[in-house]
Amino acid sequence: MDLKLDGMTAAITGGSAGIGKAIALSLAKEGVDVAICARRQEPLEAAAAEIALQTKRKIVPIVADLTKTEDANAFIAGSIEALGKLDILINNAGSAAGGTLESLTDEDWEAALALKFFGYVRCTRAVVPHMRAEGGGRVVNLIGNDGVKPSYWEVAPGAANAAGQNLTMSLAGQYGGDNITFVAVNPGPVRTERWDGLVKAMARDMKLPFEEANQLAPRSIPLGRIAECEEVASLVTYLASPLATFINGTMIEIDGGQQKPLMDAYRDG
């Protein structure tokens, strides 16, 4: 299928690894020139070089800490300068610590919102004037299913995700008349570089062996496994394309039909 993306441009936050890197590669394979950002220069530049080598597209690495407004503004401005325009923004950077109400500190809660929510606000606020001037654009927010499928160990991620989902729906209504569309993509568990660390933290907090904790997510998913980054990237690539321009103000879950109560019930014994 021709997604009609050839010659378009995109900015992707958190593009040096995991889902963000997979999205950058998927878009570049469809003919998109891409700017990616992350906080660490070395892995960011390595990811950009790898994607450029595979796809022969222009891949621009820009170091940015999206907890800072000036960095978010500089990332968007730098992307426009390097690529000539921005058709697509993929907000992806951010994570939040798992834990229970008793174990999470104020700093954990603040960190959950600082990047995963406010980073999205900052980049979107920076790109909207450009997209308006260009006659439209696509914003796809990678959020997470914790916001609609709560689990008590994921209370901080769930709060950040719910805020991001509300933001997406609100902006879809505000900017639809400018031909700027907003979609939230809600992955469940995904096999990224962070996965083992998340399982270790869950095992610690739930006092479970690593092997048992590692089975909690697959057991809650009818397909019996967690997602691969490429599966999420394929969905996002379609949603960013001109074939999906009537999809606006909606949330799409990509979690294999995960049933979170099964995780909680197993942990509760």
Image: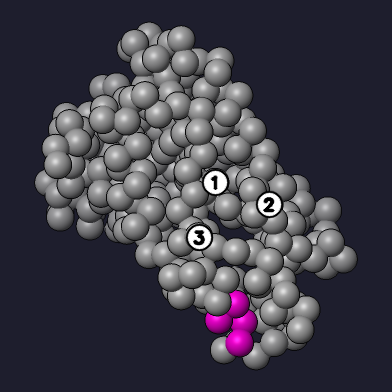
Label 1 sits on residue:
143
Q: In front of the other: label 2 or label 3? A: 3
Residue for point 55% across, 36% down: 120
Residue for point 43% across, 70% down: 223
Tell me where residue 148 appears, x and y as whole percent. 64, 48
29 shown above or below 211: above
Magenta extent: 212-216
Give the distance between the C-alpha atoms of the residues marked 1 and 2, in whole angstroms.
10 Å
Residue 158: give its label: 2
Sequence-wise, the earlier of marks 2 and 3 is 2
Residue 202: image quadrant is bottom right
Q: Amino acid at mark 2?
A: Gly
Left/right of residue 92 with respect to residue 94 in the rendered view? left
Residue 81: image quadrant is top left
Residue for point 57% across, 71% down: 220
Q: Secondary structure at mark 2?
A: helix
Disc 3 vs disc 1: Cβ atoms closer than 8 Å? no
Label 3 sits on residue:
257
- The crowd level at tag 1 (other Cα within 10 Å; few <14, some 14-19, many 20+) is many
Q: Secondary structure at mark 1?
A: loop
Q: Is residue 192 visible?
A: no
Q: Amino acid at mark 3?
A: Gly
Tell me where residue 87 appears, x and y as whole percent. 32, 25
Sequence-wise, the earlier of marks 3 and 1 is 1
